[in-house]
Image: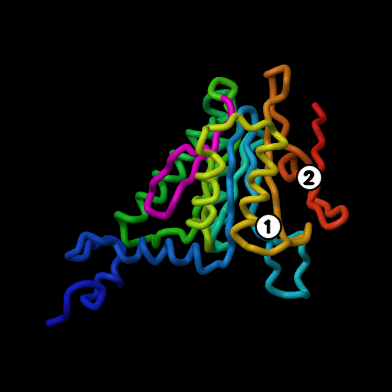
Amino acid sequence: MSSRGSGGGYDRHITIFSPEGRLYQVEYAFKAVKAAGITSIGVRGKDSVCVVTQKKVPDKLLDQTSVTHLFPITKNLGLLATGMTADARTLVQQARSEAAEFRFKYGYEMPVEVLARWIADKSQVYTQHAYMRPLGVVAMVLGIDLEFGPQLFKCDPAGHFFGHKATSAGAKDQEAINFLEKKMKNDPAFTYEETVQTAISALQSVLQEDFKANEIEVYSCFLLLNDECLQLVAKYGLCSCICVVENQIVVLVWRAV
């Protein structure tokens, strides 16, 4: 007779609880996120949201422009995927289709929370049925809601989703969260520049090393002064431009209407 716990075969089944009340395949999905070796950070300011992540190119022969963890979903929504890139691309493609269908059906862009809830619901269903394994991805969804302002949500393989003032995912997520808790202790109302700087400094702190401009990626979005639209900056409408000037990281932002 097989022993209890992971040795009892419960780790081979997606939908069966172990005697301790654990779903091992879901736990393994979280480990897959960390195994990717990427740390991502998100920070929400008073009128903006910024996420930053490492960019690792595993092969020198790869075209660096084809390696990314940052994806535009709509002109108003962005997604940062931490974990297995193949799973992330599948999730992004489905999210884009869902957002387009929402726009066609209701006549306005999908809100940030609605997309985050959809991703979480989809992930949760995967924990109930054996036909699909959980995705090895933690998704941060960001954008600005004209009613509620800046929004930052994190969705995990278990189907949880929560709004955050600041959060982290990946290999060194706990160290980053500890850093962010100190920064956000007094609930500061960060400006756009402070929001971006906090996200980048948090990543630099947990990695404990200086990184080059091509070793990180940044998404940022902010509410324009006229409160009528959202401008996601730089290439593809989402990605800020990072450059290095005298060993200091400088974020260049285009605020074209």
Q: Are marks 1 and 2 in contact (CB under 8 Å)?
A: no
Pick the front one: 160 or 114? 160
Residues in magenta? 149-165
Residue 217, above or below 207: above
Q: Residue at x 87, y 53 (%)?
A: 245
Label placed on residue 190: none
From this viewpoint, which residue is outermost toward the bottom?
Answer: 1
Q: Position of residue 35 (x, y in %)?
A: 51, 69
From this viewpoint, which residue is outermost toward the left?
Answer: 1
* Residue 187 covered by magenta stretch: no
Q: Is residue 106 left or right of residue 23?
A: right
* Residue 156 covered by magenta stretch: yes
Pick the front one: 5 or 78? 5
Quarter of image, res 19: bottom left
Q: Position of residue 74 (x, y in %)?
A: 64, 37
Query: Which quadrant: the C terminus?
Result: top right
Which colouring convention does the figure follow?
A: rainbow
Q: Secondary structure at mark 2?
A: strand
Q: Residue at x 57, y 53 (%)?
A: 81
Q: Is residue 245 left or right of residue 131?
A: right
Q: Amino acid at mark 1?
A: Thr
Q: Which residue matches tag 2? A: 251
Q: Residue at x 21, y 65 (%)?
A: 18
Q: Position of residue 92 (x, y in %)?
A: 57, 50
Q: CA distance from mark 1 to mark 2?
A: 18 Å
Q: Earlier in the sequence, mark 1 or mark 2?
A: 1
Residue 142, above or below 28: above
Mark 2, Cα crowd under 10 Å, few <14 / some 14-19 / many 20+, is some
Label placed on residue 68: 1
Pick the front one: 128 or 169? 169
Q: Amino acid at mark 2?
A: Val
